[in-house]
Image: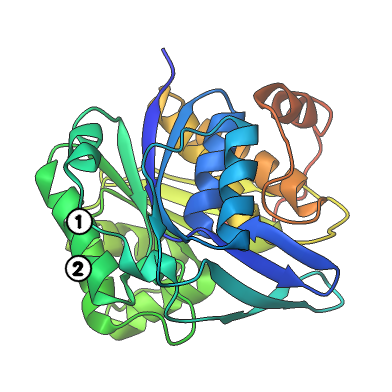
Amino acid sequence: MPKKIISYGETLWDLFNDGPRLGGAPCNLAVRIHMLGEKGWLVTRLGADELGEKALSQLREIGLLSSYIQIDSFYPTGTVDVKLNLDGIPDFTINTNVAYDFISTREDVKVAASTVDCIAFGTLSQRSEKSRETLYAILSSVPQTLKFLDLNLRRDCYTHATVRRSLEFADILKLNEDEAAFILKEFEIEVTDMRQAISAIAEIYDLSVVIITLGGSGVVVGNNEGECHYEPGFKVEVVDTTGSGDAFSAGFITRYLNGDSLGDAARFGNALGAIVATKKGGTEPVSFEDVQQFIASSPDRSIDPDYSS
């Protein structure tokens, strides 16, 4: 039976020089989950404008359930100005006062939340009081449901309070190296290596799993039972890393919910993220079978000695 996962937060258009591409971490995540054959339910808000209509049409064409996508008659659909450097790494200017800042609490969403296997969320949609309080109401209504937090810190879009509250709700935490350094410094956690960092963060915030992504070097993942695993990355020709982290999240969550080990779930997530990095934008089609074939055809991976010991 397919796993059901709510992805809460921003749907927006990444405005590249060559045109807009549908994105936003929660949107990318829900799309990837759906493409992997599971059920991704996107809880978001779009403007009643051309970009909103285009987003809704594109999501429906993909086959994503649109029942929990709200329409705002006042605020516009979210947009982000994106510039890529020569290595394909994006720099974002995230526009404010947009529809996803005003996601409202609805009873049907709370009912849906009580039936899913996991709720995924981040910090960007918490920059406004309205969407933040809606998120907290949903999370509080289902205390036993697994909660996946992709911290996803964006410039000027988070506070110490929202980070701390998010950590209190989370069961699984995903960070990149910069975000891990931020958590360690912000909350005065002293460690000497990545494994200690995972163990300390998991213990302090009562987390089941902590994931630290390392870009092309792979990922380190550990749990609250002392297990820690380094999974090396896959070498690919990078076109655009937009959405690669969200693809990793989708791959990891779906395999974890299906009973895979931490290492196997991380390997699948790494592979999906690598494939997405070879494409433009965050929602280009990649199937479960595509990922399996990619892993099978990529047996040799470089192990980064900084993380493998």
Closer to the camera in the image, 141 or 298: 141
Looking at the rendered structure, the secondary structure element under dot 1 is helix
Q: State the SS at label 2.
A: helix
Determine crowd level at label 2: few under 14, some 14-19, many 20+ residues with C-alpha closer than 10 A.
few
Residue 57 seen in this snapshot: yes
Give the residue at mark 1. Answer: 169
Q: Give the spatial CA distance, label 2 vs label 1.
A: 7 Å
Query: Would you place residue 216 above or below residue 43 in this image?
Result: below
- Tag 2 and tag 1, C-beta contact below 8 Å: yes
Q: Is residue 308 visible?
A: no
Residue 156 location in percent, x, y? 43, 87
Work out whether 112 lies above or below 296.
below
x and y percentages locating residue 181 in the rendered image: 44, 78
Residue plotted at (16% across, 42% down): 107
Give x and y (percent) for residue 119. Answer: 31, 43
**Residue in the foreground of this view, choosing between 154 and 20:** 20
Q: Quadrant of the N terminus?
A: top left
Q: Nearer the viewer, residue 28 or 53?
A: 53
What's the residue at 11%, 45% (across, down)? Answer: 141
**Residue occupied by mark 2:** 165
Amino acid type, label 2: Arg
Quarter where residue 19 is shown = bottom right
Name above or below for residue 251 compared with residue 163.
above
Q: What's the mark number on residue 1?
A: none
Q: Quadrant of residue 31?
A: top right
Relative to 78, is 200 on the left or the right?
A: left
Going by the numbered disc 1, the residue's amino acid type is Phe
